[in-house]
């Protein structure tokens, strides 16, 4: 069986104000050509089909056209939802569509309910796990309310189902940040405080693990891989080679994995230096036709920098200022530079300290943390805050949950 592993299409996303929908449609056409040229049996999409829970009508049309073309080319298409998708909207009509060759899995209740396909060697069980938000999924899975808890419980249920299918080969798809993976600036955090990573060992016992969420195509182990996003969504991905994985599944499991590169609509370039040097340096000739991020290091901010840069580099999409060492006091650095790479909670606490002149105390940090968690949960379709809090309380150590129940009772 030949499986094309892809993920993180993020249909409807733009790049620094540039509409990417045409390039995204072209990528889906590329997948159709790969299905035909490589005789692909199954296209497996590991989450984040759309960029937001309520996608625009044009993004919905691109998906409709793309899925119809993939099925029409002869592939079975297996899709799971990611943290950007609305599970309810993406999963609408899934039971009816399964008969056409399109298999949508978006609900935690079906985590261990495989899509069963077959080749000349027998049965292959596909387990496309939807993104499992801990506060929502923990109660359904009977696990602690953490990323490792819900994914571990789902993977254990998968292994239990596999044990009832002797001889079946298995493929599991998951949308998660697995330890060892390399992130980029364009992924949405899965949790507040950077505690969303899970170990790859959670998925032991299956033949191939198709991961989604991180946007760089990468190999964590021979049979545990991220396909990455088909397009770059941040300048931190300038060095990525985008594409998918073509997985060969033989009689005894994975017999080979081959990289399939995606079409590149426009190169990315990251330029750094003094404005006059950038305008004159012949080594930057290739950047003249690229989308550019420019960091100026002039000791003083030049006049009309964007206008001057665009006389040579018409598509400068992001301009930064980082004066040479000693030229500018740290407090004068740009807000983006001062907050880059810092956790959301730290940024919020730093803002309060800046405007009030004193650091946040423990209760204030706790309130900010809960507010940030609520923002993350707001995008999860079907989120029930009462059920989620019960799940958190049941999973919490004695103290937090006990205090909350006591407060409610009082």
Image (cartoon, rainbow, N blue to C red):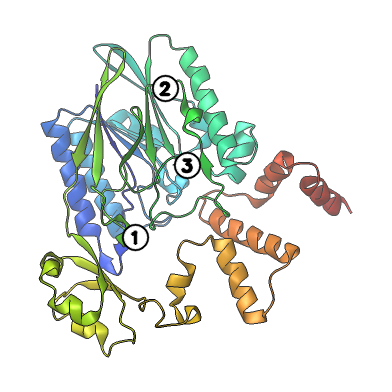
- Considering only order in the chain, which callout, 3 or 2, is on the residue closer to the N terminus? 3
Q: Which residue is mark 1?
A: 56
Place of residue 215 in the rendered image (x, y in percent of width and height, measured from the top left): 34, 49
| Disc 2, SS | loop
Label number found at residue 131: 3
Which quadrant is home to the N terminus? top left
In the rendered structure, the answer to whether residue 14 lies left or right of residue 356 reads left
Place of residue 46 in the rendered image (x, y in percent of width and height, measured from the top left): 37, 39
Q: Which residue is found at the position 43% from the left and 45% from the top?
A: 82
Give the spatial CA distance, label 1 vs label 3: 21 Å
Residue lying furthest front: 326
Place of residue 275 in the rendered image (x, y in percent of width and height, measured from the top left): 23, 80
Question: 47 or 320, which is in the foreground?
Answer: 320
Query: Of the residues tagged 1 and 2, which is closer to the observer?
Result: 2
Q: Quadrant of residue 267?
A: bottom left
Q: Quadrant of residue 396?
A: top right
Which quadrant is home to the C terminus? bottom right
Question: 380 or 229, which is in the foreground?
Answer: 229
- Considering only order in the chain, which callout, 3 or 1, is on the residue closer to the N terminus? 1
In the rendered structure, the answer to whether residue 365 lies left or right of residue 91 reads right
Q: Which residue is mark 2?
A: 206
| Disc 1, SS | loop
Question: 370 or 292, which is in the foreground?
Answer: 292
Give the spatial CA distance, label 2 vs label 3: 18 Å
Place of residue 253 in the rendered image (x, y in percent of width and height, measured from the top left): 32, 17
Q: Which residue is found at the position 54% from the left and 24% from the top?
A: 156
Query: Of the residues tagged 2 and 3, which is closer to the observer?
Result: 2
């Amino acid at each position: 069986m030949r499986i094309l592993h892809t993920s993180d299409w993020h249909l409807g996303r733009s790049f620094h104000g540039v509409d990417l929908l045409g390039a995204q449609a072209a990528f889906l056409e590329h997948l159709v050509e790969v299905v035909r040229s490589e005789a692909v049996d199954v296209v497996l999409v590991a989450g984040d089909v759309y960029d937001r829970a309520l996608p625009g009508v044009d993004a919905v049309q691109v998906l409709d056209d793309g899925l119809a073309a993939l099925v029409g080319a002869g592939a079975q298409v297996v899709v799971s939802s990611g943290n950007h998708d609305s599970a309810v909207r993406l999963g609408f009509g899934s039971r009816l569509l399964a008969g056409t060759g399109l298999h949508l899995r978006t609900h935690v209740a079906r985590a261990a309910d495989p899509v069963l396909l077959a080749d000349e060697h027998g049965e292959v069980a596909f387990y496309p796990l939807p993104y499992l938000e801990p506060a929502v999924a923990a109660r359904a899975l009977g696990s602690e309310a953490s990323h490792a808890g819900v994914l571990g419980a789902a993977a254990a249920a998968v292994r239990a189902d596999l044990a009832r299918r002797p001889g079946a080969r298995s493929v599991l798809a998951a949308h998660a940040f697995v330890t060892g993976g390399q992130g980029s600036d364009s992924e949405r955090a899965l949790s507040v405080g950077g505690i969303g990573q899970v170990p790859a060992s959670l998925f032991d016992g299956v033949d191939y693990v198709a991961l989604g969420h991180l946007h760089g195509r990468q190999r964590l182990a021979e049979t545990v891989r991220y396909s990455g996003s088909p397009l770059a969504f941040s300048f931190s991905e300038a060095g990525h080679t985008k594409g998918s994985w073509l997985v060969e599944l033989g009689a005894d499991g994975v017999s080979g994995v081959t990289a399939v590169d995606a079409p590149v609509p426009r190169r990315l370039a990251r330029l750094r230096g003094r404005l006059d040097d950038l305008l004159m340096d012949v080594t930057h000739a290739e950047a003249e036709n690229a989308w550019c991020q420019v960091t100026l290091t002039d000791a003083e901010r030049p006049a009309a920098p964007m206008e001057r840069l665009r006389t040579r580099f018409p598509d400068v999409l992001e301009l930064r200022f980082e004066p040479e060492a000693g030229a500018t006091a740290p407090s004068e650095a740009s807000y983006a530079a001062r907050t880059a790479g810092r956790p959301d909670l730290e940024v919020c606490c730093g803002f309060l300290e800046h405007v009030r002149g004193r650091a946040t105390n423990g209760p204030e940090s706790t309130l900010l943390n809960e507010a940030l968690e609520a923002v993350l949960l707001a995008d999860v379709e079907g989120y029930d805050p009462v059920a989620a809090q019960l799940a958190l309380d049941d999973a919490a150590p004695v103290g937090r949950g006990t205090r909350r129940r006591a407060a409610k009772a009082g």
